[in-house]
Amino acid sequence: MSENSTPEAHASDPLKSVADAMEHAVQAAKDGAADARARVDEALPKVNRFVSRLVYTTCYTLSYGVVFPSVLVARSIPRDNPLVHGLVDGAHAAIDMVEDMKKGKTTSLTGESTPALVQP
């Protein structure tokens, strides 16, 4: 009989094949991790550029979409009419009320003095 046909040889061959398979799996995992890291390092600048451009475009579009119509409406309303005078008077009243609140007093509609919110 040959040397390979002994029971010890048959028992060691499956273990050796399992060990070889494990070694190949570990090496493949290492190679896969290195490939994945290389791809991430390559893709990261592209993703950063995309996100940056997306944020810029979104903010630009929103600001243009808010400012342009507001200015268009504001410029299209004639200056000498009750609507404009009411808006201006309301803005001045709001500014005065904020200044009063900063000073510590606000006057209610009845003219009574009430304590304002105190900031620490």
Image (tube, rainbow, N blue to C red):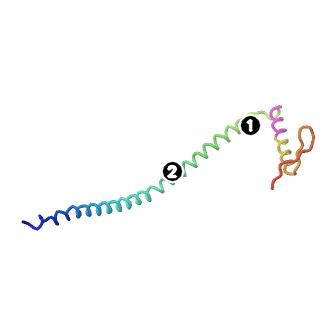
Quadrant occupied by the C terminus: bottom right
**Viewer-nearest residue: 119 or 76:** 119
Q: Residue at x 44, y 59 (%)?
A: 41
Q: Residue furthest front?
A: 7
Quadrant occupied by the N terminus: bottom left
Is-magenta flag for residue 82?
yes
* Picture quadrant where residue 37 is located: bottom left
Q: Is residue 67 left or right of residue 19?
A: right
Q: Residue furthest top?
A: 82
**Viewer-nearest residue: 5 or 41:** 5
Where is mark 1, residue-wise?
74
Where is mark 2, residue-wise?
50
Report, in whole angstroms, how far the alpha carbon at label 1 lies from the one at label 2. Answer: 36 Å
Q: Position of residue 12 (x, y in %)?
A: 20, 65
Q: Residue at x 32, y 60 (%)?
A: 28
Kindly identify the amino acid type of the residue bearing the numbered disc 1: Ala
Q: Residue at x 19, y 63 (%)?
A: 11
Q: Position of residue 61 (x, y in %)?
A: 60, 43
Mark 1 or mark 2: which is in front? 2
Kindly identify the amino acid type of the residue bearing the numbered disc 2: Phe
Q: Is 101 above or below relative to 9?
A: above
* Picture quadrant where residue 93 is located: top right
> What segment carries the magenta color?
81-90
Q: Residue furthest bottom?
A: 3
Q: Earlier in the sequence, mark 1 or mark 2?
A: 2
Q: Main secondary structure of the magenta part?
A: helix
The secondary element bearing badge 2 is classed as: helix
Q: Position of residue 74 (x, y in %)?
A: 74, 37
